[in-house]
Image (cartoon, rainbow, N blue to C red):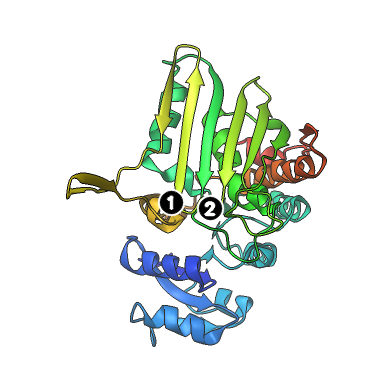
């Protein structure tokens, strides 16, 4: 491996461009070696934004980027429907991968990725559940694992966005937005989620016509805990993510806004983050740095392909529950032995 890990970034949109900047300007031990995007001009603009034209190769084809000189690892930030093919192409080359969620658009695709990695006999993929790298979430995880508050009984979660993009559907509130809470709950509690119920209040006046927004999503776990998630993607005022763990001997809450408060003219105003790249900027930085550090040691230490599959399977049960209004069990495949290893 070279002195600086050569990374191919796939996707130069909102998320991809931010990762290109992050690898080039924030993360130590890595460099952007190649960028791929179907829109060549967008890729060139992202590379030009860091002064990388001439030293970073730009491609419209994924495999060309993976085969570019100096590429030793892959960061996938393209649209979700392109992730499975890119992951399998990386596996075929033995390249370690950090893949933004979702790992594939459905659980069948994510299971194919799990099975392909299991056939390799070693982990190569880390999935981008960045909340595991947020300082407050990590503090809550440490507290729960330490047992000082006793057994966790419930998690109360809030996930709010200013507005949803034009293509957003009612199902995407669960399989796109709440997928983060699914992974966070599995990680915080150390338990699989076994059933889902979705309650649907009358849609907000701020929701686009036909969008069931907000929703209250209820999860049951294998250990008898209950998780509720209020998801509201057209709240209109800001991006908010909160979580409270209620345990036998106490509770702990994270997500209160730690932003600037301005006091003037007889009043006070507190800034509210407007999107996830602001709220979780530090988490993304730590996630990518951790991935680079582990990759340089030949390790995968973050959430893996099985976590990506589990999130997809639970989300699919949630989408079925949304449609039927009934409690819906989660159907999951057996976990390959590869993912039982420490």
Q: Callout 1: few (<14), some (14-19), or many (20+) C-alpha neighbours within 10 Å?
A: many
Q: Quadrant of the C terminus?
A: top right
The label number, if any, that marks residue 53 in the structure image: none
Q: Nearer the viewer, residue 34 or 212?
A: 212
Q: Quadrant of the N terminus?
A: bottom left
List x then y, in percent, for residue 331: 79, 37
Residue 104 seen by the camera:
yes
The label number, if any, that marks residue 128 in the structure image: 2
Residues at circles 1 and 2 in contact by the CB criterion of under 8 Å: yes
List x then y, in percent, for residue 135: 36, 40
Q: Residue 112 sits in which quadrant?
A: bottom right
Say how many tags the image has: 2
Picture layout, residue 115 above or below residue 222: below
List x then y, in percent, for residue 250: 43, 15
Q: Residue 323 sits in which quadrant?
A: top right
Q: Nearer the viewer, residue 28 or 287?
A: 287
The residue at which mark 1 appears reads as 287
- Disc on the earlier residue, 1 or 2: 2
User: Under tag 2, what secondary structure?
Assistant: loop
Q: Nearer the viewer, residue 176 or 92?
A: 176
Q: Callout 2: few (<14), some (14-19), or many (20+) C-alpha neighbours within 10 Å?
A: many
- Left or right of 192? Residue 288 is left
Alpha carbon distance from label 1 to label 2? 8 Å
Residue 289 seen by the camera:
no
Q: Residue 166 sits in which quadrant?
A: bottom right
User: Under tag 1, what secondary structure?
Assistant: helix
Give me the residue at 43% from left, 44% from top: 133
- Left or right of 216? Residue 244 is left
Q: Nearer the viewer, residue 208 or 253?
A: 208
């Amino acid at each position: 491996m070279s002195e600086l890990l050569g990374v191919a970034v796939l996707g130069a949109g909102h998320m991809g461009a931010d990762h290109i900047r992050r690898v080039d300007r924030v993360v130590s031990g890595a460099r952007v070696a190649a960028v791929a995007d179907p829109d060549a001009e967008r890729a060139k603009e992202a590379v030009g934004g860091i002064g990388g034209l001439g030293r970073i190769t730009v491609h419209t084809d994924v495999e060309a980027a993976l085969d570019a000189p100096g590429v030793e690892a892959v960061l996938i930030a393209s649209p979700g429907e392109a992730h499975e093919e890119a992951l399998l192409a990386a596996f075929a080359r033995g390249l370690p991968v950090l893949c933004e969620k979702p790992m594939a658009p459905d659980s069948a695709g994510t299971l194919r990725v799990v099975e392909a990695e299991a056939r390799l006999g070693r982990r190569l993929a880390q999935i981008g559940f960045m909340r595991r790298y947020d300082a407050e979430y990590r503090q809550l995880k440490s507290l729960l694992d330490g047992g000082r508050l006793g057994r966790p009984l419930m998690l109360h979660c809030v996930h709010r966005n200013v507005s949803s993009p034009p293509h957003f559907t009612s199902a995407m509130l669960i399989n796109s937005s709440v997928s983060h809470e699914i992974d966070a709950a599995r990680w915080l509690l150390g338990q699989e989620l076994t059933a889902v119920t979705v309650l649907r209040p009358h849609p907000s006046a701020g929701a686009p016509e036909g969008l069931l927004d907000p929703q209250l999503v209820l999860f049951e776990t294998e250990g008898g805990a209950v998780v509720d998630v209020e998801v509201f993607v057209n709240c209109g005022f800001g991006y908010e993510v909160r979580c409270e763990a209620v345990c036998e001997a106490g509770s702990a809450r994270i997500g209160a806004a730690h932003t600037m408060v301005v006091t003037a003219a007889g009043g006070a105003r507190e800034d509210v983050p407007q999107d996830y790249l602001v709220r979780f900027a530090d988490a993304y930085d730590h996630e990518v740095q951790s991935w680079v550090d582990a990759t340089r040691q030949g390790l995968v230490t973050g959430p893996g392909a099985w976590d990506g599959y589990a999130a997809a399977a639970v989300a699919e049960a949630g989408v079925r529950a949304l449609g039927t209004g009934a409690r819906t069990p989660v159907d999951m495949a057996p976990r390959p032995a590869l993912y039982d290893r420490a």
